[in-house]
Amino acid sequence: MEGFTYIDIFATEGIEYLVVIVFLLLIIPFWMFLNR
Amino acid sequence: MNGKTATEEINSFKDFMIFIRSELKPKGRIFTIFNVISAPIILLGAILIVYRLAKGLGWPVTNLSQDFPWGIWIGFDVMTGVAFAGGAYVLTFVVYVLGAKKYHPIIRATVLNGFLAYVFYTGAIFLDCGRWWNIVNPMIGNEFGVNSVLFLVAWHFLLYTLAELVEFSPAIAEWLGWKKIRKILASLTLGAVIFGITLSTLHQSGLGALVMMAKWKIHPLWYTEFIPVLFFISSIFAGLSMVIFEGTISHRVFSQQIDEEHHRTYDDILVGLGKICAVAMVGYFFLKVLVFIHGKHWSLINTPMGYWYLLELIGLVLIPCLIFVQGVKDRNLLSIRVAAILTMAGIIINRLNYVFIAYKWYIPMSERYFPTWIEIVITLAIVFAEIWVFRWIVNRMPVLKESPEWAREE
């Protein structure tokens, strides 16, 4: 392990929220699509 | 080929021994292609296991070393095997908790498969222990090892194996004609199922947690704090893919045991399993994307390990997921089966990545781990022996065939 590195865990927070919201919005229509 | 269950209840030890002796006789042809290939491998594997226990883990038995302490026995037999056994907890949840009776015809075969997987792959752990005589320590003390995830995995394997035995035990009681015992065992099923599902959530993720402390040894594209969650979610579709694969083979090999109605409903069952796999794989894929974005690993994609990562994620998760979707929409059973095989390949590669491929990826090719022929033969022997036991049980007990009338009436 070499030295100390600073990692900003909030740098990608915005896009991560978008990915989660897209997933939550799509998963139920996806299940309904499979069951049609 | 149809096994007989005891039509008269066995009440004496003498009757029991007569029945067991009759059941020990081979059923079906002896010199099949599968038997001719697998029997010598099992025999050779048994000899090599004794050699391994006597000589230890070093060369020439295995290529394991300080750099690569885990090889195919852990990577394939334990981690992959247990992921594939996940079909049991998923299917029992779907049938007994969600009440989807449509999958009931395959539940016994799936639970039997899961039970045998845990038994044999616990054996694989036993073989991988340098001091195999200490394997009982997590159970009896003499340094339990409570700080280790492996302590949890050891206890869970034991308890889950027992839970699956309880779930399967009504079939054994029906085979032996033990009516009263069968009634008691059947009443324990729901409790065993709930206990088994609870255990599975933790030990499936626990197998991933085993590599958590190796942060600097696992390639950043694979290492994440979410490894346990990824292992658990992937065990859902890994297990169901195995159910699809094993069910396809069982329905051909044991087709004369299966009644007309079960044959008719099997297509619906496969489509349903494909649906669950597709949804689980979508969830897994999104989680992998999330982890990738969070880690900001963009620069690593354009490297050899990056291409390997894309092969695993796109080629063996996303593409099989899309094939499952197409198979479900068109009711194309061939597509569902192909998707299941691709998914299983992806799981094998994923688990092996954590154990010795993406693990210490920086070590030159000439110094990397590659299994010895002894490791490969023993691995094959374990798998073939499990298939032999599965076949022995299915040919005799009511697993794919109907339960005796007295059991169905209860």
Image (cartoon, helix red, strand yellow):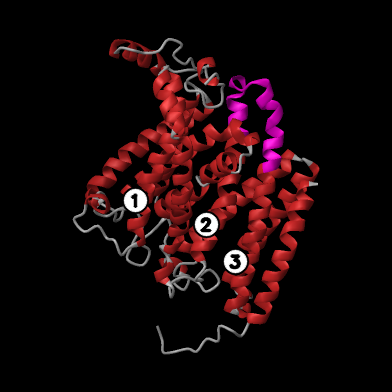
Please provide percent x and percent y for residue B101: 63, 35
Tell me which segment is drawn in magenta.
B248-272
Instruction: Classify B135 as above or below B270.
Output: below
Q: Residue at position x 67%, y 70% from top?
A: A20
The answer to whether residue B329 is visible is yes
Q: Disc 3 residue type?
A: Tyr
Residue B264: in magenta span: yes
Please provide percent x and percent y for residue B119: 39, 41
According to the picture, the residue beneath numbered tag 3 turns out to be B309
The subunit letter for the residue under badge 3 reads: B
According to the picture, the residue beneath numbered tag 1 turns out to be B155
CB contact under 8 Å: marks 3 and 2: no
According to the picture, the residue beneath numbered tag 2 turns out to be B232
Instruction: Classify B283 as above or below B299.
Output: above
- Give the foreground label among 1 and 3: 1
Number of marks present in the image shown: 3
The subunit letter for the residue under badge 1 reads: B
Instruction: Classify B199 as above or below A23.
Output: above
Of the two numbered discs 3 and 2 on the same chain, state the one appearing first in sequence: 2
Q: Disc 1 residue type?
A: Trp
Residue B156: in magenta span: no
The answer to whether residue B388 is visible is no
Disc 2 packing (10 Å; few <14; some 14–19; many ≥20) = many
Q: Residue at position x 77%, y 57% from top?
A: A29
Disc 3 packing (10 Å; few <14; some 14–19; many ≥20) = many
Q: Residue at position x 60%, y 45% from top?
A: B241
Helix, strand, or loop for circle 1? helix
Is disc 3 in the same subunit as disc 2? Answer: yes
Q: Disc 2 residue type?
A: Phe
